[in-house]
Amino acid sequence: MTGHCPTPTRRAALSRLAALAGLGAWPAVRSQPPSHWRIPGSFEPVAAVWMGFDAGHAPWTAQLALALAPHAPIKMLVASDALAQQARETLFDLGVAVDGLVFHVDPQAGFFLQDAAVFAVGPQARPGVVDFVFNRHGLPAWCARRFASDREREADCAAHALNGNDLARAIAAFANARVFDSPLALEGGAVEVNGRGLMIVNEAVMRTRNPDWERDRIEQALLDLPGVRKLIWLPQGLAEDAHLRSTIVGRHVAWGAGGHTDQFVRFADPRTVLLAWPDDGEAARHPVLRLNRERMQRNFTILSRERDADGRALRVIKLPLPRGVERAVVLRGDADTAYSEQWTADDFPVSDGHRQGDTVMQVAPASYLNYVVANAVVVVPDYLRAGTPKALQRRVQAIFERAFPGRQIVFVDSLAANWYAGGPHCAVLSEPRA
């Protein structure tokens, strides 16, 4: 359903389907990692940046590689030797020094790697990888909403969550990393930590990934992750980062991951939090951005009152959102929904009121928060060509320069990836350097 890259664990996915069918669930298994292991913050030094490749995203991939390569080694993870050769030739033609790239081949590989795994670091700089359950970004929960009155079609739809691989383990093998199994269904784009014991959690994501879990069970599984000691729960992310294909409000629809933290809230350092913030005028004129203002105001209130795992106050900085971007989409009965350009009324519950032939407005999950930090550079989405005023983007750049002093700020046009529910951070996987 989305452009995000899979890392499923079949047994836990079967648990979701068993619960759906009323058959009970596999018993939960919790492992407590040693305290000297931790998941580092995304602002910390990296040993390498992993990237995927497909021909459709080649120009954008080249832009990311050109921005990142001077600051960190790049490891390309592709599905075949033939695709590796195509990547070398294509990226070379686009100006990338491919001799400096390391290629790994695994048939499970996809393009957007951020959701494939979460790196940890341990003693003597040993790498680790957290292997979450992958259920295709909460596909069973989406199916339950879409086919609320048809259990047979719901189960058939949810069965697609079983089709996947163990890409996290493949990455761990390539990196010679220890594997930490987690019973939670989750993706890397929803893991936001400060590297010092604090994790920010979007409850909406946790509910759609683990609908049959109570909150205390989710909380315990999160506290079992390497180095995590305290959680801050936020209720919702950006409205346009919808749960798969969904109606936001009225005729406005979106395709997203359902509220990944890398779209709306990020740590710039152990105590500084960047929070997405809609412009006053935009929020007043557009119903989706009005929802965003309400959601982000709630998040700001929570974060402003919270402290880190050591009891120190957080500094919350409001980072403007780009100007809203949307496009008209005609719902077609013959649509091939493997591609985001094509939509069908069958993507929505009947109660949403959409019919084949209707025109809806797809809102892109555009956000400056989907940035990548790689040592001395911060790669930030660019929305000037999408209509964001230069003055607004200069304000954003100034905030990044203050939040990441001494680092180069590079903007890369990322709207094409947004339509596929992706962005720069979604497209890379940072391997930490101790």
Image (tube, helix red, strand yellow):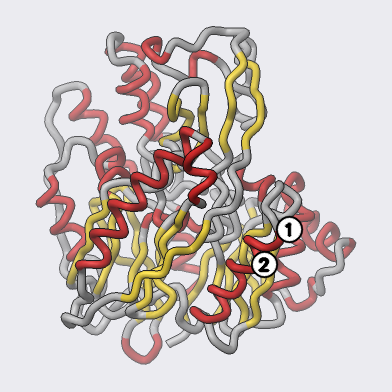
* Image quadrant occupied by the C terminus: bottom left
Residue 300 vs residue 7: left or right? left
In percent of width and height, residue 334 lies at 64, 11
Determine whether the residue tagged by mark 2 lies in a helix, strand or loop.
strand
- Asked whether 369 or 94 is in front, the reply is 369
Tell me which amino acid carries mark 1. Ala
Q: Which residue is mark 2?
A: 103
Q: Is residue 76 left or right of residue 172?
A: right
* Picture disc at residue 278: none
**Location of residue 333 in the rendering, given as x and y in whole percent from the top left corner:** 60, 9
Q: Badge 2: how crowded within 10 Å, few (<14), some, or many (20+)?
A: some
Q: Earlier in the sequence, mark 1 or mark 2?
A: 1
The residue lying toward the viewer, choosing from 248 and 64, is 248
Which percent across, then down, holds residue 330?
65, 17
Please identify the quarter of the rendering in which residue 71 is found. bottom right
Q: Nearer the viewer, residue 263 or 136?
A: 263
Describe the element under mark 1 as helix, strand or loop.
Answer: helix
Marks 1/2 in contact by CB < 8 Å: the verdict is yes
Q: Locate residue 409, reporting x and y percent.
A: 64, 75
**Res. 416 in view:** yes
Q: Residue at x 41, y 69 (%)?
A: 317
* Residue at x 44%, y 43% (from the top left corner): 257
> Which residue is at the front of the view, 291 or 131?
291
Disc 1 target residue: 84
Residue 81 seen in the current view: no
Instruction: Judge whether 153 appears above or below 277 on screen.
Output: above
Q: Which amino acid, by three-letter code, is at mark 2?
A: Phe
Q: CA distance from mark 1 to mark 2?
A: 7 Å
Vertical relation: 9 (above or below) 223: above
**In the shown orientation, is residue 384 left or right of residue 11?**
right
